[in-house]
Amino acid sequence: MSISNLTLEQGLTIGEGITISLGSSGGGGGYSTTNVTYTFGSVSGSTVSDSSGSGKNGTIVTSTGSASTGTDSHGAYIHLLNSAYIDVVGVNLNNSFTISMVASIDSTQVKYWASLWGNETWTTGAGLVAYLSAVDNLDVTAGGHIGGNQNINVGSYTLSDVAQWDFVFNFTAGFTLTVYRNGSAILATTSFSPPAGGISMNDLYIGSRHASDGTGSLDTINMKLYKFNLFNTALDNATVGGNYTNNRVTFNF
């Protein structure tokens, strides 16, 4: 596979996670020793290619919405609109992991329960969700509204700006959550209990909290997504900062 315009990011080891590429070219053999950044082309059909080598491609689910690709001053993106989301099938989150995304939320987005990502099963209190609780307020919750639910308000930010968001979960050493915006911790490492029903589910949803499991609502979000990563480790400050330094140049923000 030929790859162009890539930026190497520091601090990652073999087996560290999933890089979802929104281009049409697929992954290679084996896990990447580093994360890679592409200048994205168009999505081929409904498949979102995983360039990490782990083979965890995503599926674009449009439902009543739409997903389109394009390029602006920040680079190539996929635009999820009106109930469209990406379903990453067969991904079970580790006890320690990091979700990182470069994205901007549409300024017209209805803010309550619009989900950046999730893997929740509402009826069993399982999984996690990062969502908007009010105008430009970002929250992270565990387990929906079943017993053991924990919710943390990260803060209020201009979410329509292109930014890098990192959600670092460590449930193996102290049960903690750290959230970063553009390489800086906006939620310092905070005690965060895992969901009562468990962390790992079969799917991870980008732009949705779940697949309408028991609620009749996907709680999707309208956003431009430039990059999404799932790392199967809790990244440290230096690695998050280094990745941001590279992405800031690549995506001009």
Image (tube, rainbow, N blue to C red):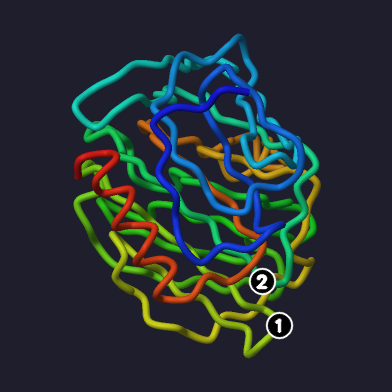
Q: Quadrant of the C terminus?
A: top left
On residue 198, the disc is none
Q: Residues within 10 Å of mark 1 (few under 14, many from 20)?
A: few
Image coordinates for residue 141, horizontal then vertical, percent? 54, 65
What residue is shown at x 23% (from left), y 22% (from top)? 72
Q: Toward which corner of the image does residue 98 lie, by quadrant?
A: bottom right
Q: Where does label 2 land, which residue?
A: 96
| Depicted 38 relative to depicted 67: above or below | below
Amino acid found under the numbered disc labelled 2: Ser
Q: Quadrant of residue 7?
A: top left
**Which amino acid type corresponds to the residue marked 1 in the rendered image?**
Thr
Residue 143: x percent and y percent?
67, 64
Around disc 2, counting alpha carbons within 10 Å, would you say few (fewer than 14), some (14 to 19), or many (20 or more)? Answer: some
Residue depicted at 27% across the width and 39% down the height: 251
Q: Residue at x 33, y 44 (%)?
A: 111
Depth check: give the residue in front, 230 or 68. Answer: 230
Q: Where residue 165 sits in the image (x, y, percent)?
A: 38, 56
Say left or right for 222 vs 151: left
| Mark positioned earlier in the residue sequence (2 or 1) | 2
Give the Cα separation between the discs numbered 2 and 1: 6 Å
Task: Determine which quarter of the picture holds residue 28.
Answer: top right
User: Front-most of 109 and 174?
Assistant: 174
Quadrant in which the N terminus appears: top right
Q: Are marks 2 and 1 in contact (CB under 8 Å)?
A: yes
Q: Which residue is mark 1?
A: 172
Q: Secondary structure at mark 2?
A: strand
Farthest residue in the top direction?
A: 45
